[in-house]
Amino acid sequence: MIPVLLSIGPLHLYSYGVCIALGVLLSVFLMTRRAVREGFPAPDDVLDISFWTLVWGFAGARFSYIGQNFSYYLAYPLKIVAVWEGGLIVYGGLLAGLLGFYLTARKKKIPFWKMLDFIVPYTALSQAFGRIGCFLNGCCFGKECGFPWAVRFPDMAYAVHPAQLYEAAFDLFLFVFLLSKRKSARFEGQIALLYFAFYGFGRYMIEFFREPNLVWLGLSSGQWTSILAVTAAFGFFMFRQHQTRRKKGR
């Protein structure tokens, strides 16, 4: 656990923020290079859409966390802006980021599904860096664990699953997997929907190793959201596949 990488007087460089920044910068760099190489989208469009998707996604992730811990932030309102301490909910960020992405793509008249296919692998890459930041920050930790790779954070009496690193590894795998599928995709939107389906399934499984905040009917809030994500992705997948077949049949 290394929440602060460097301190100079009252200024602190937080590992959580650094990891998120590195993930975003690397993703934008790789997307821009790919855009130049493949001719879609325009490099300027990559920057614009990435910026607004990030702004919307960050706000959604933060406000989702605040809503889940409303009583705490009601007692300590100044902590609302303390994002360097952690406190982002992925699904809130994905939904809000998707809305920001849609509005920006529509304004710039960029094909929604085609652009979404382009950007989602790098979303997984950015998430991997964010989870490494969670590990260094000591948040989003797992349940008690006796395995050799278990970790013990300060002020904890027992070792726990490094659930943050489990998800980081899964996100990296998902990034590579989605990129490998981009040339064999049969319809626009397939890569994006594979992301939501596979991420939802992976997150559902990893939740078994995490310390849940809210539990209903034996499943955590993250698992219920994952079920909704997988179900929606499967439904849209079948719909888009059917649309494509109808167009080819004409």
Image (tube, helix red, strand yellow):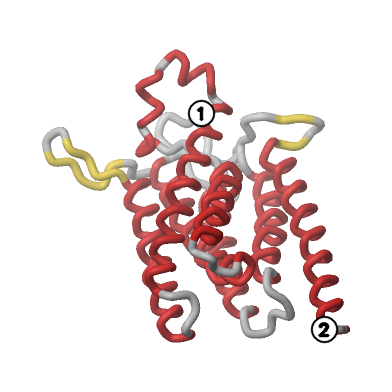
Q: Position of residue 30 (x, y in %)?
A: 41, 73
How would you rate the neighbour count of disc 2 (Cα within 10 Å): few for under 14, some for 14-19, many for 20 or more? few
At 37% across and 46% down in the image, what residue appears? Answer: 16
Tally of marks: 2
Closer-to-camera residue (210/173): 173
| Residue 234 in view, yes or no | yes
Point out which mark residue 144 bears. Answer: none
Residue 14 vertical position relative to residue 232 in the rendered view, above or below: above
Instruction: Tell me which amino acid carries mark 1.
Output: Ile
Q: Position of residue 150 (x, y in %)?
A: 53, 48
Instruction: Tell me which amino acid carries mark 2.
Output: Lys
Residue 38 vertical position relative to residue 98 in the rendered view, above or below: below
- Label 1 vs 2, first from the N-terminus: 1
Q: Looking at the figure, which quarter contains the N terminus?
A: top left
Q: Which residue is mark 1?
A: 66
**Quarter of the image holding residue 3?**
top left
At 48% across and 37% down in the image, what residue appears? Answer: 62
Closer-to-camera residue (93/102): 102
At 78% across and 65% down in the image, what residue appears? Answer: 237
Does residue 174 appear to the left or right of 108 in the view shown? Answer: right
Q: Which residue is mark 2?
A: 248
Mark 1 falls on what kind of element? Answer: helix
**Quarter of the image holding residue 218?**
top right
User: Which-is-in-front pick, marks 1 and 2?
Assistant: 2
Q: Position of residue 124 (x, y in %)?
A: 54, 61
| Residue 160 in view, yes or no | no
Mark 2 falls on what kind of element? Answer: helix
Closer-to-camera residue (91/47): 47
**Quarter of the image holding residue 217?**
top right
Residue 34 vertical position relative to residue 81 in the rendered view, above or below: below
